[in-house]
Image: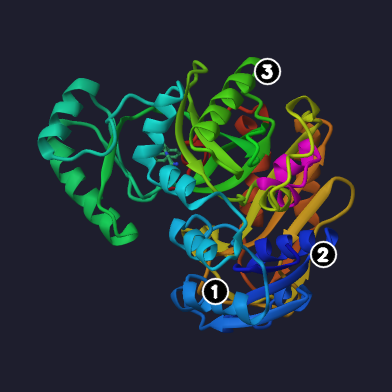
Amino acid sequence: MKRILIANRGEIALRIIRALREYGYFSVLAYSEADRDSLPVKLSDAAICIGPASARGSYLNIPAIISAVEITGCDAVHPGYGFLAESPQFARVCMDAGIIFIGPSPEAMEKVGDKSVARAVAKNAGVPVVPGSNGFVSSKDELFKLAKEISFPLILKAAAGGGGKGMRIVQSFSELENSFDTASNEAKTAFGNSKLYLEKYVSEPRHIEIQFARDKFGNCVSLFERECSIQRKHQKLLEESPSSFVSPKLRKELSEAALAIANQVDYVGIGTAEFLVTQEEKFYFIEINARIQVEHPVTEMVTGIDLVELQLIIAEGKPIPFSQDDVKITGHAIECRINAEDPRNNFCPSPGKVTQFIPPCGPGIRCDSHLYSGFEIVPYYDSLIAKVISYAPNRERAINRMQRALYEMTVEGISTTIDFHMEVLKNAFFRKGDYYTNFVQRRMGIK
Ligand code: MV4
């Protein structure tokens, strides 16, 4: 690989451009008309417009992206996260055109992309899954039969979903049929696939994920956990590593479970296995994310491993250049996702011109952001504007360091979630590490 096209935008496009420059690759950014004045356009080696502002016409437009690869003479595509990152169709089109897709094979993505299939794969690999349906629920008869067996509360999930979209918690038989119909219609509209699967609902779990990597020789490593329980409406707000809840024994068990699933689907690339962990330290696999994730920097800080570099190494067909024994967690890292949203107005998006941007820096602070003073935040995409990552020898110092960084950070001209994060960091339950997926609702009094 020499020339790599980035089919993405914002902070992750910039993150990939930075890696490509450091590791000696030529970067080509594919951008939409709305992103013409963006920092990734300025900092890439070359840039090519692929279509209008609407994602359909640009960042999701497979023919336009393939044409851009061919026009610019690229040999590989990095999809970032979101958009086409987990599309087996896109990966297959790339493969057929002789373009390297920096991610897992279409076959592996197909298996883990259907969450009901991923459950079956995990079960086959001997990994605990939440009691539920085998594959998708094929009829109302089966739905009622399963509900009786598993007992309430239950959760219906879209097989093609993930990240919380198209989910329904069901408390009783009286709601069951209605919830099924609504959820399957929602799934059909959102994913073009109405299939649902059923699970026992686990109350107040922690949401813990394992970062793993596997190469084409079958070498695989766990880069350990990220704690992702601080979220609102399935949008993660803050992530950290290590989790104060995960013992060395649980870390080893979660890691072995993640690698067993990766082996089972012959996964080549980096990925994440998500688990629900109960207060009693029981864990259940829920899904695989077949991409570089937004929260990857916390793992990079505590392991010292560059995950984009690792993606490039694996995509080149080279072996992972270290072994499991070389992977050690040192210190503690926290990431705050800063959005252009108004927390006082139900986190409503707040696009507009950034009149002044002063990123936080100083010891132990990393800021991944595509903002600059004078930049216009457009309303067409995700509202993530910056990720602030603090790194320190222990959790308390990482929290204090994050407070210092957010105090320094200035974003003028729009509303942001900086002050909201300041409140989270002050919260006594958060500071004790005493939190679950209901933290924002329960401890911050937010819907
Ligand atoms: C669950 C669950 C409880 N039980 N599955 C949310 C994100 C997606 N990846 C999976 N999610 C969940 N799956 C079972 N069997 C709880 C969540 C969950 C959640 C569910 C409803 C409302 C808010 C939530 C916040 C975090 C996790």
Q: Amino acid at mark 2?
A: Arg
Q: Residues within 10 Å of mark 2 (few under 14, many from 20)?
A: some
Q: Amino acid at mark 3?
A: Pro
Expressed as whole percent of the image width and height from the top left, the position of residue 429 reads 60, 30
Q: Secondary structure at mark 2?
A: helix
Q: Secondary structure at mark 1?
A: helix
Q: Nearer the viewer, residue 35 or 235?
A: 35
Quick one: label 1 or label 2, which is nearer the N terminus?
2
What residue do we see at 48% from left, 76% from top? 63
* Ligand 1 image-quadrant field: top left
Q: Is residue 31 magenta?
A: no
Q: Amino acid at mark 1?
A: Ile
Mark 3 or mark 2, which is nearer to you?
Answer: 2
Q: Residues within 10 Å of mark 1 (few under 14, many from 20)?
A: many
Q: Nearer the viewer, residue 60 or 415?
A: 60
Q: Across the whole image, how many numbered discs are drawn on residues?
A: 3
Q: Residue tagged by mark 3? A: 248
Looking at the figure, which quarter contains the N terminus?
bottom right
Structure colour scheme: rainbow
Placement of 280 over or under 77, stated as above or below:
above
Left or right, residue 205 beside residue 356: left
For residue 21, the mark is 2
Question: In the current view of this chain or complex, which residue is farthest to the left?
Answer: 141
Placement of 416 over or under 209, stated as above or below:
below
Q: Main secondary structure of the magenta part?
A: helix
What residue do we see at 73% from left, 27% from top? 324
Q: Residue tagged by mark 1? A: 66
Question: In the current view of this chain or complex, which residue is farthest to the right?
Answer: 363
Q: Is residue 207 visible?
A: no
In the image, the segment drawn in magenta is 296-310
Left or right, residue 446 beside residue 242: left
Placement of 90 over or under 66, stated as above or below:
above
